[in-house]
Image (cartoon, helix red, strand yellow):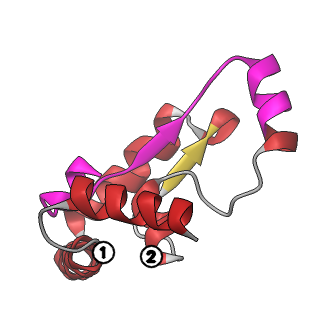
Amino acid sequence: MECAFFGVPTVTLYKTSWSTYQIGRFIVNVKWLTMPNILADDVIFPEFIQNDATPQNLAGAALALLQNESRRQTIKSQLARIVSSLGGSGAPERAATAILGLFQQ
């Protein structure tokens, strides 16, 4: 999310132990793991998970971003929309109000 906040196009990877990955596959049911992708409901940051997180895949995706100015600009504008959709400052107060509202119902 920090990269999203600052508008930095990036490539993401997630790698864990084999057993943790196998268990997680059955517990977690999401399209993406990267928070900006989840918020956008689309692929903004390329994701490489477990066996796909190879040096070749990561380097290829990073080079593709570095060599494609229009793609980087598209990602930056998508990130700006995501960040603005989160609202302005005061998130802790809004969250506390929402939680208190649940108890008042």
The answer to whether 103 is drawn above or below residue 28 in the figure is below
The answer to whether 17 is drawn above or below residue 29 in the figure is above
The CA distance from mark 2 to mark 1 is 6 Å
Q: Are marks 2 and 1 in contact (CB under 8 Å)?
A: yes
Q: Quadrant of residue 68?
A: bottom left
The secondary element bearing badge 2 is classed as helix
> To which residue does mark 1 refer?
82
Image point 25% across, 82% down: which residue? Answer: 81
Percent coordinates x, y for residue 47 in the rendering: 52, 52
User: On the picture, is 7 further left or further right than 42?
Assistant: left
Type of the residue with mark 1: Ile
User: On the picture, is 20 further left or further right than 74?
Assistant: right
Which segment is the magenta one?
1-24
User: On the picture, is 61 further left or further right than 65?
Assistant: right
Percent coordinates x, y for residue 8 in the rendering: 18, 58
Camera sees residue 8: no
> To which residue does mark 2 refer?
40
Q: Quadrant of residue 94?
A: bottom left
The answer to whether 97 is drawn above or below residue 73 in the figure is above
Few, some or many C-alpha atoms within 10 Å of disc 2 (few <14, some 14-19, many ≥20)? Answer: some
Image point 58% across, 71% down: which residue? Answer: 105
* Res 60 label: none
Percent coordinates x, y for residue 48 in the rendering: 56, 46
Q: In the rendered structure, which disc, 2 or 1, sits on the residue that comes first in sequence?
A: 2
Type of the residue with mark 2: Ala
Camera sees residue 50: yes
Image point 48% across, 53% down: which residue? Answer: 34
Residue 17 covered by magenta stretch: yes
